[in-house]
Image (cartoon, rainbow, N blue to C red):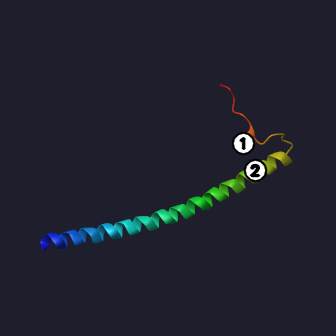
Amino acid sequence: MTDTTSLEEQIAHLTRTVDELSEIVARQETALALATRRIAMLMEREAGREMDGGGTVPLADQRPPHW
C-alpha cells in the first residue's frame, strides 16, 4: 500500500507540474506572437520613414558590407 500511495502522490505532483508548465508555455506563446506583430509594425513604420526621407532603399533591404 505504501508503494501505491507514493506512486499516486508522484503522479499527482507530476500532473500538476505539467499543467503549470503548459499554462506558462501558452502565455509565452501569446506574448511572443504579440511581440512579433509589434516588431513587424515597427519595421514597416521605419521603412516608410526612410522612404519618405528620400532614401532609395530601406536599410533592412540593403546588403551588408563585404568585410
Residue topped by disc 1: 60
Residue at the spot x=77%, y=42% of the render? 58
Judge whether 14 appears above or below 46 on screen: below
Residue topped by disc 2: 46
- Label 1 sits on a secondary structure element that is helix
- Amino acid type, callout 2: Glu
1 and 2 marks in contact (CB < 8 Å): yes
Residue 6 quadrant: bottom left
The image's mark for residue 43 is none
Q: Nearer the viewer, mark 1 or mark 2?
A: 1
Towards the viewer: 24 or 46: 24
Residue at the spot x=71%, y=56% of the render? 41
In which quadrant will I find the N terminus?
A: bottom left
Judge whether 1 appears above or below 37 on screen: below
Residue 12 quadrant: bottom left
Towards the viewer: 55 or 10: 10
Distance from label 1 to label 2 (Cα)? 9 Å
Residue 56: give x, y in percent of width and height: 84, 40
- Amino acid type, callout 1: Ala
Is residue 5 left or right of 38 when viewed as pictured? left
